[in-house]
Amino acid sequence: MFNKYKFLVAGVNTKVPLKNKKMVNYINFDNAATTPPFMSVLKEILSFSNWYSSIHRGKGYKSQLSSDLYDESREIVANFVGADINDKEIIYVKNATEAINMLSNILRKDNSNSVVLSTCMEHHSNDLPWRKGNIDYVKIDDLGRLDLNDLEQKLIKYDGDVKLVTVTGVSNVTGYKNPIHKIAKIAHKYNSKILVDGAQLVPHTKVNMKSVNSPDHIDYLVFSAHKMYAPFGSGVLIGPKSTFQKNGPDYVGGGTVDIVTPETVIWADPPDKDEAGTPNLMGVIALTKAIKTLSLINMKNLEKYEDNLLHYAMRSMKHIPDIKIYGDTDNIKDRTSIVPFNIEGISHEAVAKMLSAEYGIGVRNGCFCAQPYIQNLLNVSKEEIKEKMLIPNSPKPGMVRVSFGIYNDFNEIDVLIKALYKLVNNKQYYIDKYEDKNAIHRC
């Protein structure tokens, strides 16, 4: 089937060498990690380069133009995710990881003794920053989905002390799309706010933070441009204006102040206060162009196409012997375009090596920066975890992850399926060829 979106993306015809020296078109099934740029983004960057200048600091024409584009971009971002620009602050950062760390530092200043509820399915970036304070974790069920009953029970247990529920919009392991508005309504019922890690959500489905007057509105949202076809070092933190008005900035330096004397510092208003140093204008230009391109595609069209890819891959992979696909493979309406799997008797690292060397397919293997979730899905006991940590060079638990983008197509999935059949039917040959007995299979 012809993919009309394919040539919107750079590098789709790039050829790479196989182990036998043959050159083939690279198949990138590692889009959950990062995405290549839109062609429109590259053209926009090149075109704007002639006008690039410092922002908020110069009276020259280029500086004024750059400043206007930078400031106007916030409304483009807000409209894309349904954020009320009058209520929400749009702060630019490097990526979602920096956004969560920044918010963690800010909120801890006002709520040092409060509890943060995270979940057992989070990326490390939405887990580790919160471990500096009081944290508890919402459970998952046997299929790896979030247990909303446990969420409410924990909110009841802490009796108003939970100031934030932080949850991934889409798991980067299983592709489960969490019911963020249902979670938000539960959190607000118990006087808590909600942060959604939108790194895997925003690029794959339409997001609406909703008005603050809605019981199921989203208080905070973070996402990264590099996962939505604009890999030029920008990310976004969105939250209530009041959050950023209370305290000094997380990072200090140029651009964060109104007045500095030997004795006094008066901070600028947000968002300037929270964007220390020279802003990444090129990254913002790339992000806004990616948003415009995604809007032209229409996020509903994108979601429908990627759902078709997911259904096709799931149907095909389920018939391959010795393959274990994690999560619910029957009811996949709440899954986005991610398929995590293992092949019995062969390590995740060897599978990834074989797909690359024999077919030019790029996948991710390991724990995808979500080790507790992986350990849970693999039923790895605490004793096993401790044992593997103590033994040097011991193979680490993990999976192989296939993740699709708008430019992938059904023919590429057919190549993957052919490769997996070949691997399963000739398992010992590929074990001898690609298993490294002394390797550390890193998560």
Image (cartoon, rainbow, N blue to C red):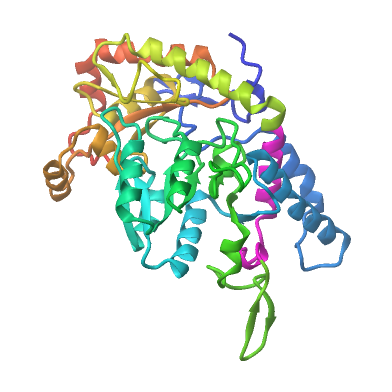
Judged left or right of residue 229, residue 142 is left
Depth check: give the residue in front, 9 or 171: 171
Most extreme residue toward the bottom is 263
Depth check: give the residue in front, 441 or 66: 66
Q: Give the x, y percent position of residue 420.
A: 34, 15
| Vertical position of residue 422 compared to residue 159: above or below | above
Residue 16 is at least partly visible in this image: yes
Q: Quadrant of the C terminus?
A: top left
| Vertical position of residue 243 compared to residue 48: above or below | below
- At 75% from the left and 55% from the top, the residue drawn is 71
Q: Which residues are magenta?
A: 270-293
- At 81% from the left and 61% from the top, the residue drawn is 63
- At 35% from the left and 63% from the top, the residue drawn is 132
Q: Splitting the image into 4 quarters, where does residue 161 fall?
A: bottom left
What predominant SS class does the magenta segment belong to?
helix
| Vertical position of residue 49 compared to residue 348: above or below | below
Query: Is residue 418 rendered magenta in the image?
Result: no
| Vertical position of residue 30 compared to residue 267: above or below | above
Query: Is residue 288 rendered magenta in the image?
Result: yes
Q: Give the x, y percent position of residue 58.
A: 81, 67
Q: Give the x, y percent position of residue 175.
A: 42, 30
- Number of dots carrying numbers: 0
